[in-house]
Image (cartoon, rainbow, N blue to C red):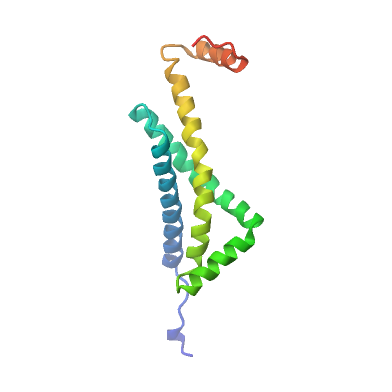
Amino acid sequence: MSRTSQMEPTTSTGIAALIKYIGAQAAIAVMTIILTLLLSWPKNAQEGAARLAGTFFLSFIFGPLAAMAAYWAWPGLFEVAKRLTQAHQFDPMFGYLYVCAPFQVLAGLPAWWIVGAIVRWFERRKGMDIGEIIEDGRRTLSGRSKV
């Protein structure tokens, strides 16, 4: 085999793989956002932007961890997905992504409601200074909120 016929890995190959990975993660996060928008519409643009950002980042960060936990719990599920995609002449990684996507979406869903609750909590306390907000937070946690 001649030296010219061998291909050495390049930096551009690694960058392309990184772009594919980030693109897949972003696509899954966008699916999460679409699902949450169908369930609960934000009251205003500011709340919507905060909820979108929170959902995107929670899905992007904790989604892979949820997928890894699923792989650890149900490795056979991932093996079946890999074999199914190979049987149809697709890249086996597509099977893994197909199985991982629901877990990644589920990882992002709580942010929609958590961020929404925080934004609305602060909106009801507009005009309060930081001390009043802290005191009201204590009252809220103890169940005695005035707002």
Q: Position of residue 52 (x, y in %)?
A: 41, 37
Closer to us: 23 or 96: 96
Q: Position of residue 120 (x, y in %)?
A: 44, 23
Q: Position of residue 114 (x, y in %)?
A: 51, 31
Q: Quick one: which residue is furthest to the right in this view?
A: 73
Closer to us: 102 or 30: 102
Q: Residue at x 46, y 35 (%)?
A: 112
Q: Position of residue 141 (x, y in %)?
A: 60, 18
Q: Residue at x 41, y 42 (%)?
A: 33
In screen coordinates, is 71 left or right of 104?
right
Q: How many circles with numbers are drawn on the protein? A: 0
Q: Residue at x 53, y 44 (%)?
A: 107
In the rendered image, which quarter is residue 123 located in?
top left
Q: Residue at x 51, y 14 (%)?
A: 133
Q: As displayed, is residue 54 above or below residue 25? A: above
Q: As displayed, is residue 104 above or below residue 91? A: above
Q: Quick one: which residue is furthest to the bottom in this view?
A: 1
Q: As displayed, is residue 111 above or below residue 74? A: above
